[in-house]
Amino acid sequence: MPIVINPPSAPLESMLAHSWLADDQKAAFATSPFVPNTVSVSSYLSPWLVSNGFNAAAIRGGELCIQDEQVTVCLMNQALDFLQKALCNAIAHYILARNGLETWARVTNYYASYFSVHSLLCLQGRTITRLQLDSALPAQLVPIDFRSHIFGITTRHLGKNPHHETPWKRFYEIYDRYAVPHEAYELVSRKAHISDPTDESIERNRINYTPFEGFREIRDLARHQEFSNLFANYISALKEKSTLEGFLIDLRGFASDPDHKYFARTLLKLALAGEIILSIRGASGGIEAEWVTISQRWQSFLATVFPNPSDCYLLRFVPLIGSGPN
Protein backbone atom coordinates (compact mmCIF):
# COMPACT_ATOMS: atom_id res chain seq x y z
CA MET A 1 0.00 0.00 0.00
CA PRO A 2 1.41 3.42 -0.88
CA ILE A 3 2.70 5.69 1.86
CA VAL A 4 2.62 9.46 1.33
CA ILE A 5 6.01 10.94 2.13
CA ASN A 6 7.47 14.43 2.23
CA PRO A 7 8.79 15.60 -1.13
CA PRO A 8 12.58 15.46 -1.49
CA SER A 9 14.73 18.58 -1.33
CA ALA A 10 15.52 18.30 -5.04
CA PRO A 11 12.60 19.38 -7.25
CA LEU A 12 10.74 16.64 -9.07
CA GLU A 13 11.58 18.39 -12.34
CA SER A 14 15.22 17.45 -11.85
CA MET A 15 14.29 13.74 -12.03
CA LEU A 16 12.14 13.88 -15.17
CA ALA A 17 15.00 12.95 -17.46
CA HIS A 18 17.19 11.18 -14.91
CA SER A 19 18.79 8.05 -16.35
CA TRP A 20 18.96 5.24 -13.80
CA LEU A 21 21.94 2.92 -14.08
CA ALA A 22 21.53 -0.77 -14.81
CA ASP A 23 22.49 -1.50 -11.19
CA ASP A 24 19.71 0.84 -10.00
CA GLN A 25 17.18 -0.97 -12.18
CA LYS A 26 18.36 -4.35 -10.95
CA ALA A 27 18.21 -3.26 -7.29
CA ALA A 28 14.74 -1.73 -7.64
CA PHE A 29 13.13 -4.72 -9.33
CA ALA A 30 15.01 -7.28 -7.22
CA THR A 31 13.59 -5.82 -4.00
CA SER A 32 10.01 -5.70 -5.24
CA PRO A 33 7.71 -8.68 -4.51
CA PHE A 34 7.11 -9.53 -8.15
CA VAL A 35 4.03 -11.53 -9.04
CA PRO A 36 2.81 -11.64 -12.65
CA ASN A 37 -0.57 -9.96 -13.02
CA THR A 38 -2.52 -7.53 -15.18
CA VAL A 39 -2.67 -4.66 -12.67
CA SER A 40 -1.44 -1.44 -14.26
CA VAL A 41 0.01 1.52 -12.40
CA SER A 42 -3.22 3.43 -13.00
CA SER A 43 -5.54 0.61 -11.88
CA TYR A 44 -3.42 0.14 -8.74
CA LEU A 45 -3.05 3.79 -7.75
CA SER A 46 -6.42 5.22 -8.81
CA PRO A 47 -8.60 3.40 -6.20
CA TRP A 48 -6.07 4.19 -3.47
CA LEU A 49 -6.02 7.88 -4.40
CA VAL A 50 -9.83 8.06 -4.41
CA SER A 51 -10.14 6.27 -1.07
CA ASN A 52 -7.66 8.72 0.46
CA GLY A 53 -9.50 11.82 -0.73
CA PHE A 54 -7.34 12.74 -3.71
CA ASN A 55 -9.45 14.04 -6.58
CA ALA A 56 -8.33 15.31 -9.97
CA ALA A 57 -8.12 18.91 -8.77
CA ALA A 58 -5.84 17.95 -5.86
CA ILE A 59 -3.42 16.05 -8.11
CA ARG A 60 -3.56 18.68 -10.83
CA GLY A 61 -2.69 21.39 -8.35
CA GLY A 62 0.61 19.94 -7.20
CA GLU A 63 2.81 16.90 -6.82
CA LEU A 64 2.33 13.87 -4.64
CA CYS A 65 5.24 11.75 -3.40
CA ILE A 66 4.65 8.14 -2.43
CA GLN A 67 6.69 5.11 -1.47
CA ASP A 68 5.50 1.65 -2.43
CA GLU A 69 7.37 -1.38 -3.80
CA GLN A 70 4.14 -2.64 -5.35
CA VAL A 71 4.29 0.23 -7.85
CA THR A 72 7.59 -1.22 -9.04
CA VAL A 73 5.86 -4.57 -9.55
CA CYS A 74 3.22 -2.84 -11.68
CA LEU A 75 5.95 -1.22 -13.75
CA MET A 76 7.62 -4.55 -14.53
CA ASN A 77 4.31 -6.15 -15.50
CA GLN A 78 3.60 -3.16 -17.73
CA ALA A 79 7.08 -3.38 -19.28
CA LEU A 80 6.47 -7.03 -20.17
CA ASP A 81 3.01 -6.29 -21.54
CA PHE A 82 4.24 -3.39 -23.67
CA LEU A 83 7.01 -5.62 -25.00
CA GLN A 84 4.42 -8.23 -25.97
CA LYS A 85 2.31 -5.57 -27.72
CA ALA A 86 5.41 -4.45 -29.59
CA LEU A 87 6.10 -8.01 -30.70
CA CYS A 88 2.53 -8.53 -31.95
CA ASN A 89 2.74 -5.34 -33.99
CA ALA A 90 6.12 -6.42 -35.38
CA ILE A 91 4.52 -9.67 -36.57
CA ALA A 92 1.61 -7.80 -38.17
CA HIS A 93 4.06 -5.39 -39.81
CA TYR A 94 5.94 -8.32 -41.35
CA ILE A 95 2.79 -9.90 -42.79
CA LEU A 96 1.67 -6.58 -44.28
CA ALA A 97 5.10 -5.77 -45.70
CA ARG A 98 5.51 -9.23 -47.25
CA ASN A 99 2.29 -8.56 -49.16
CA GLY A 100 3.44 -5.15 -50.38
CA LEU A 101 1.03 -3.15 -48.18
CA GLU A 102 3.65 -0.53 -47.51
CA THR A 103 1.70 2.24 -45.79
CA TRP A 104 0.00 0.14 -43.16
CA ALA A 105 3.14 -1.93 -42.69
CA ARG A 106 4.95 1.28 -41.78
CA VAL A 107 2.14 2.46 -39.49
CA THR A 108 2.03 -0.91 -37.73
CA ASN A 109 5.80 -0.86 -37.38
CA TYR A 110 5.45 2.56 -35.73
CA TYR A 111 3.26 1.01 -33.03
CA ALA A 112 5.74 -1.80 -32.49
CA SER A 113 8.40 0.85 -31.91
CA TYR A 114 6.04 2.97 -29.80
CA PHE A 115 5.20 0.12 -27.43
CA SER A 116 8.91 -0.75 -27.18
CA VAL A 117 9.58 2.81 -26.00
CA HIS A 118 6.87 2.50 -23.35
CA SER A 119 8.41 -0.77 -22.17
CA LEU A 120 11.81 0.87 -21.90
CA LEU A 121 10.32 3.81 -19.96
CA CYS A 122 8.71 1.41 -17.47
CA LEU A 123 12.09 -0.26 -16.99
CA GLN A 124 13.35 3.18 -15.95
CA GLY A 125 10.63 3.41 -13.29
CA ARG A 126 8.26 5.75 -15.07
CA THR A 127 5.08 5.76 -17.05
CA ILE A 128 2.70 8.23 -18.65
CA THR A 129 -0.82 7.18 -17.79
CA ARG A 130 -4.39 8.27 -17.07
CA LEU A 131 -5.60 8.17 -13.47
CA GLN A 132 -9.28 7.34 -12.98
CA LEU A 133 -10.34 9.70 -10.19
CA ASP A 134 -13.52 11.81 -10.10
CA SER A 135 -12.54 12.50 -13.70
CA ALA A 136 -9.92 10.96 -15.97
CA LEU A 137 -6.59 12.69 -15.38
CA PRO A 138 -3.49 12.42 -17.60
CA ALA A 139 -0.48 12.12 -15.30
CA GLN A 140 2.99 10.71 -15.11
CA LEU A 141 4.84 8.66 -12.56
CA VAL A 142 8.42 9.82 -11.98
CA PRO A 143 10.96 7.80 -9.97
CA ILE A 144 12.60 10.00 -7.34
CA ASP A 145 14.55 7.20 -5.63
CA PHE A 146 14.03 4.10 -7.74
CA ARG A 147 15.96 1.77 -5.45
CA SER A 148 13.75 2.79 -2.50
CA HIS A 149 10.53 2.73 -4.57
CA ILE A 150 9.86 6.45 -4.08
CA PHE A 151 7.83 8.05 -6.85
CA GLY A 152 6.29 11.36 -7.70
CA ILE A 153 2.86 11.68 -9.27
CA THR A 154 2.37 14.81 -11.32
CA THR A 155 0.31 16.23 -14.16
CA ARG A 156 3.03 18.68 -15.09
CA HIS A 157 5.53 18.46 -17.94
CA LEU A 158 3.30 16.27 -20.10
CA GLY A 159 3.62 18.59 -23.08
CA LYS A 160 1.00 19.30 -25.72
CA ASN A 161 0.81 15.70 -26.87
CA PRO A 162 1.35 13.24 -23.99
CA HIS A 163 0.47 10.28 -26.21
CA HIS A 164 2.72 10.46 -29.29
CA GLU A 165 5.23 13.19 -28.51
CA THR A 166 6.17 13.24 -24.83
CA PRO A 167 7.05 9.50 -24.57
CA TRP A 168 9.52 9.81 -27.45
CA LYS A 169 11.14 12.95 -26.03
CA ARG A 170 11.38 11.43 -22.57
CA PHE A 171 12.85 8.22 -23.97
CA TYR A 172 15.69 10.01 -25.76
CA GLU A 173 16.33 12.34 -22.80
CA ILE A 174 16.85 9.29 -20.58
CA TYR A 175 18.50 6.75 -22.84
CA ASP A 176 20.81 9.26 -24.50
CA ARG A 177 22.93 8.92 -21.33
CA TYR A 178 22.25 5.26 -20.62
CA ALA A 179 25.12 2.78 -20.92
CA VAL A 180 23.62 0.45 -23.53
CA PRO A 181 25.09 -3.09 -23.57
CA HIS A 182 25.92 -3.11 -27.29
CA GLU A 183 27.02 -0.38 -29.68
CA ALA A 184 24.20 -1.25 -32.09
CA TYR A 185 21.71 0.07 -29.52
CA GLU A 186 23.26 3.51 -29.77
CA LEU A 187 21.43 3.87 -33.10
CA VAL A 188 18.13 3.95 -31.20
CA SER A 189 19.16 5.60 -27.94
CA ARG A 190 21.52 8.46 -28.87
CA LYS A 191 20.08 11.76 -30.07
CA ALA A 192 23.05 12.14 -32.41
CA HIS A 193 21.59 9.42 -34.65
CA ILE A 194 18.15 10.96 -35.16
CA SER A 195 16.89 14.13 -36.84
CA ASP A 196 14.21 14.70 -34.19
CA PRO A 197 13.12 12.72 -31.10
CA THR A 198 9.63 12.47 -32.56
CA ASP A 199 10.67 11.60 -36.11
CA GLU A 200 8.90 8.24 -36.05
CA SER A 201 5.66 9.87 -34.93
CA ILE A 202 6.04 12.60 -37.54
CA GLU A 203 6.53 9.96 -40.24
CA ARG A 204 3.46 8.03 -39.11
CA ASN A 205 1.35 11.19 -39.15
CA ARG A 206 2.62 12.10 -42.61
CA ILE A 207 1.77 8.83 -44.32
CA ASN A 208 -1.39 8.07 -42.35
CA TYR A 209 -3.14 11.42 -42.00
CA THR A 210 -1.82 13.76 -44.71
CA PRO A 211 -3.91 13.65 -47.90
CA PHE A 212 -2.18 11.97 -50.85
CA GLU A 213 0.96 11.09 -48.85
CA GLY A 214 0.30 7.48 -47.94
CA PHE A 215 -1.03 4.45 -49.83
CA ARG A 216 1.10 5.04 -52.91
CA GLU A 217 1.18 1.29 -53.40
CA ILE A 218 -2.54 1.39 -54.29
CA ARG A 219 -2.36 4.38 -56.62
CA ASP A 220 0.79 3.11 -58.31
CA LEU A 221 1.29 -0.63 -58.65
CA ALA A 222 4.88 -0.03 -59.66
CA ARG A 223 5.49 1.24 -56.12
CA HIS A 224 3.83 -1.90 -54.76
CA GLN A 225 6.37 -4.01 -56.62
CA GLU A 226 9.26 -1.73 -55.75
CA PHE A 227 8.50 -1.89 -52.03
CA SER A 228 7.96 -5.64 -52.19
CA ASN A 229 11.42 -6.04 -53.71
CA LEU A 230 13.02 -3.71 -51.16
CA PHE A 231 11.48 -5.62 -48.26
CA ALA A 232 12.43 -8.96 -49.76
CA ASN A 233 16.07 -7.82 -49.92
CA TYR A 234 15.86 -6.61 -46.30
CA ILE A 235 14.54 -9.87 -44.91
CA SER A 236 16.80 -12.04 -47.08
CA ALA A 237 19.76 -10.82 -45.05
CA LEU A 238 18.05 -11.22 -41.67
CA LYS A 239 16.60 -14.69 -42.26
CA GLU A 240 20.12 -16.14 -42.48
CA LYS A 241 21.07 -14.97 -38.98
CA SER A 242 21.12 -17.40 -36.07
CA THR A 243 22.65 -15.36 -33.23
CA LEU A 244 21.65 -12.07 -31.62
CA GLU A 245 25.09 -10.68 -32.42
CA GLY A 246 24.51 -11.47 -36.09
CA PHE A 247 21.15 -9.73 -36.06
CA LEU A 248 22.56 -6.68 -34.26
CA ILE A 249 25.34 -6.24 -36.79
CA ASP A 250 22.90 -6.25 -39.71
CA LEU A 251 20.29 -4.13 -37.95
CA ARG A 252 22.93 -1.54 -37.14
CA GLY A 253 23.54 -1.14 -40.87
CA PHE A 254 19.86 -1.09 -41.78
CA ALA A 255 19.11 1.50 -39.05
CA SER A 256 20.64 4.24 -41.20
CA ASP A 257 19.17 3.04 -44.49
CA PRO A 258 16.36 5.36 -45.68
CA ASP A 259 14.14 2.50 -46.82
CA HIS A 260 14.52 0.25 -43.80
CA LYS A 261 15.67 2.42 -40.88
CA TYR A 262 12.38 2.45 -38.99
CA PHE A 263 11.97 -1.31 -39.37
CA ALA A 264 15.47 -1.96 -38.03
CA ARG A 265 15.12 0.55 -35.21
CA THR A 266 12.03 -1.25 -33.93
CA LEU A 267 13.87 -4.57 -33.70
CA LEU A 268 16.79 -2.90 -31.97
CA LYS A 269 14.46 -1.43 -29.32
CA LEU A 270 12.86 -4.84 -28.79
CA ALA A 271 16.29 -6.39 -28.30
CA LEU A 272 17.45 -3.56 -26.00
CA ALA A 273 14.44 -4.00 -23.72
CA GLY A 274 15.11 -7.74 -23.66
CA GLU A 275 18.74 -7.24 -22.65
CA ILE A 276 17.82 -4.85 -19.83
CA ILE A 277 15.29 -7.38 -18.55
CA LEU A 278 18.00 -10.06 -18.86
CA SER A 279 20.20 -8.14 -16.40
CA ILE A 280 17.25 -7.81 -14.00
CA ARG A 281 16.09 -11.43 -14.24
CA GLY A 282 19.28 -12.70 -12.62
CA ALA A 283 18.34 -10.90 -9.40
CA SER A 284 14.67 -11.93 -9.32
CA GLY A 285 13.47 -15.51 -9.51
CA GLY A 286 9.89 -14.35 -10.05
CA ILE A 287 10.75 -12.21 -13.06
CA GLU A 288 12.94 -14.99 -14.46
CA ALA A 289 10.08 -17.49 -14.19
CA GLU A 290 7.65 -15.11 -15.87
CA TRP A 291 10.14 -14.42 -18.67
CA VAL A 292 10.41 -18.15 -19.37
CA THR A 293 6.61 -18.38 -19.50
CA ILE A 294 6.07 -15.46 -21.86
CA SER A 295 9.00 -16.48 -24.08
CA GLN A 296 7.39 -19.88 -24.56
CA ARG A 297 4.06 -18.19 -25.26
CA TRP A 298 5.64 -15.96 -27.91
CA GLN A 299 7.30 -18.89 -29.63
CA SER A 300 4.06 -20.89 -29.63
CA PHE A 301 2.23 -17.93 -31.13
CA LEU A 302 4.88 -17.48 -33.81
CA ALA A 303 4.77 -21.16 -34.68
CA THR A 304 1.00 -20.89 -35.12
CA VAL A 305 1.21 -17.80 -37.33
CA PHE A 306 4.19 -19.12 -39.30
CA PRO A 307 3.96 -22.95 -39.33
CA ASN A 308 6.85 -23.23 -41.80
CA PRO A 309 10.11 -22.51 -39.87
CA SER A 310 11.58 -20.79 -42.92
CA ASP A 311 8.62 -18.41 -43.32
CA CYS A 312 9.83 -15.54 -41.17
CA TYR A 313 13.08 -14.29 -39.63
CA LEU A 314 11.15 -13.47 -36.45
CA LEU A 315 11.08 -17.21 -35.72
CA ARG A 316 14.84 -16.92 -35.22
CA PHE A 317 14.96 -13.39 -33.80
CA VAL A 318 12.29 -13.55 -31.07
CA PRO A 319 13.82 -16.50 -29.13
CA LEU A 320 17.07 -14.49 -28.99
CA ILE A 321 15.44 -11.47 -27.29
CA GLY A 322 16.72 -11.36 -23.74
CA SER A 323 19.51 -13.86 -24.40
CA GLY A 324 22.41 -11.41 -24.79
CA PRO A 325 24.74 -11.26 -27.81
CA ASN A 326 26.50 -14.54 -28.53
Image (spheres, helix red, strand yellow):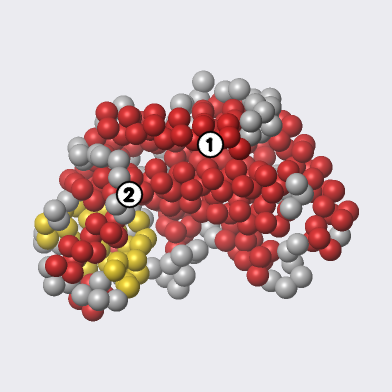
Q: In the picture shown, does residue 53 fall above or below 291?
A: below
Q: In the picture shown, does residue 110 fall above or below 94?
A: below
Question: Residue 243's image quarter?
Answer: top right
Residue at coordinates 39% horizontally, 50% vertically from top-left?
121
Q: Is residue 9 left or right of residue 110?
A: left
Which mark identifies residue 38? 2
Residue at coordinates 63% horizontally, 34% vertically from top-left?
306
Residue 265 visible in this rendered orientation of the protein? no
Viewer-proximal residue, 125 or 134? Answer: 134
Q: In the picture shown, does residue 249 fall above or below 270?
A: above
Q: What's the residue type where badge 2 is placed?
A: Thr
Residue beneath label 1, please?
A: 301
Task: Specify few, some or many for label 2: CA neighbours under 10 Å numbering under 14, 14-19, or 20 or more.
Answer: few
Q: What's the residue type where badge 1 is placed?
A: Phe
Of pointers 1 and 2, the one earlier in the residue sequence: 2
Q: Secondary structure at mark 1?
A: helix
Q: Position of residue 312 (x, y in %)?
A: 66, 33
